[in-house]
Image: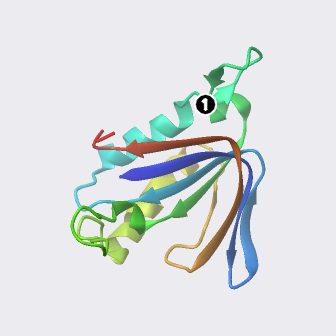
Amino acid sequence: MRVILQRVNFASVEVNKKEVSRINKGLLLFVGFGKDDTDEDLKYIFRKILNLRIFEDQNYKMNLSVLDMSYEILIVSQFTLYGDCRKGNRPSFDGSLSSFEAKRKYEEFLRLFYDNNITVKTGIFQADMKVLLENDGPVTIQLDSKKNY
């Protein structure tokens, strides 16, 4: 599982020129699922997101998590995180899950938040989404459940 996590002042998702989700200060997560992802991968990323200390404390040091700050989370599916551009000029998506399987993993991932009483907003799976955001920092972090980076 791969995630691009961005600290934002606000973020929203539009589908067909209609806003479907919006958050204020918090985290915008772009999430993608690989063919060999397991439940353990989902749990690892879930814990990492909630505990990642990327918000500043009173001394302006990144020392607080999204939970510490009670900020919002917006989760958007993005299969292109598995685009492999090492060969040629057209990305290969052979490492990503099929849309049917990815939707199931996406729902399982969301369920981790819901089951732990953490409110999240979402995009619409497989829709043509327009994501609007204002980076805070900017702070952008890559997460990979296989710990490739």
Q: Residue at x 42, y 43 (%)?
A: 143
Say which of 91 and 112 sits in front.
91
Up the image or down, 89 lies above or below 147; here it is below
Q: Residue at x 35, y 52 (%)?
A: 1
Q: Residue at x 47, y 65 (%)?
A: 78
Say which of 114 and 28 sits in front.
28
In the rendered structure, the answer to whether residue 99 lies left or right of residue 37 reads right
In the rendered structure, the answer to whether residue 134 lies left or right of residue 3 reads right
Q: Position of residue 50 (x, y in %)?
A: 55, 36
Element on which disc 1 rests: loop
The residue under label 1 is 54
Say which of 121 and 137 sits in front.
137
Q: Residue furthest front?
A: 89
Q: Position of residue 11 (x, y in %)?
A: 72, 57
Tell me the amino acid under the disc marked 1. Ile
The residue carrying pointer 1 sits among few (fewer than 14), some (14 to 19) or many (20 or more) residues within 10 Å by Cα, namely: some
Q: Position of residue 7 (x, y in %)?
A: 65, 43
In the rendered structure, the answer to whether residue 83 lies left or right of residue 113 reads left
